[in-house]
Amino acid sequence: MQDDYEQLPIELSHNPIYIQVDDILDIRVSTLVPEASAAYNLRPPELPSNMNLDNMKLEGYLVSQNRTINFPVLGTLNVANKSLVDLENYIHNLLVSDGVLVNPTVTVRLVNSKVTILGEVNRPGTYSFTENRISFLQALGLAGDLTINGNREDVLLIRNIDGILTTKHLNLTSADWLVGPYERIRPNDVIIVHPNTTKIMSRAFFGNSSSFVSLVSLGISTVVLIINLSL
């Protein structure tokens, strides 16, 4: 971001993350009397802190194609167009309005958040994260930053929002992209770092030294053969 000093200070956006199909949610309900909320948990509330992320995914609530989850006692809950905070408030209000729990605490976490980073980075791959949101620069940090051959003026971001794929080309040499929805990573984002011109040319036939040597050797051999045939 070569013009960051001219752009700062920048007010960052904090748009909520809305629940989507195939999300896996970890939902915990707790009260001052643990026995009272036990029926509303798939496991005792104290266990998740001792569990690894893979187990939490296996025991979490999978959002169906109809954007619903099957919640203990309460049954099928519609999570369409709800953020994590919205769902917390929704479940809390259901429990309180039915008079089944007093002052319950409801926490909802997305446990299968991931970002895929490909192309000219030091460690391409898919990375999981447990934070509610991470920045675009943090995501690049997970992949070990761009290589020297990465095109910093054209980084492609592919985003899936409710089954609709969108793309955005970001110029990382400018701070303009920090203002808007792309400064923060959303679950299942894909980042592709294209190679710069130098890298592309090095992969071209004439840009590859071994290919060039092979071509010259072939030319010399052809000339020698022609000379020998003419003698």
Image (spheres, rainbow, N blue to C red):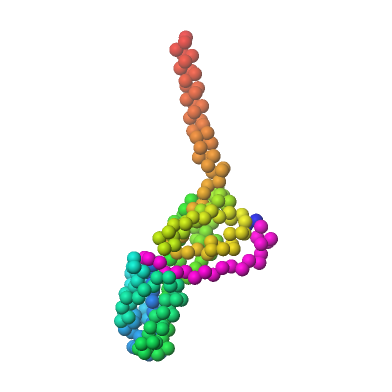
The quadrant of the rendering that contains the N terminus is bottom right
Residue 95 visible here: yes
Tell me which secondary structure the magenta stretch mostly adopts.
Answer: loop
Residue drawn at point x = 62 percent, y = 59 percent: 175
Residue sitting nearer the eye, 139 or 90: 90
Residue drawn at point x = 66 percent, y = 64 percent: 8
Compared with 14, 147 (above or below) is above
Residue drawn at point x = 49 percent, y = 18 percent: 223
Percent coordinates x, y for residue 52 in the rendering: 38, 71
Compared with 144, 102 (above or below) is below
Residue sitting nearer the eye, 212 or 25: 25
Left or right, 21 with respect to 121, comes to: left
Q: Which residues are magenta?
A: 3-22
Instruction: Please say whether residue 12 is one of the residues in the magenta stretch.
Output: yes
Q: Quadrant of residue 56?
A: bottom left
Percent coordinates x, y for residue 114 in the rendering: 43, 63
Percent coordinates x, y for residue 127 in the rendering: 44, 61
Percent coordinates x, y for residue 154 in the rendering: 55, 51
Residue 126 visible here: no
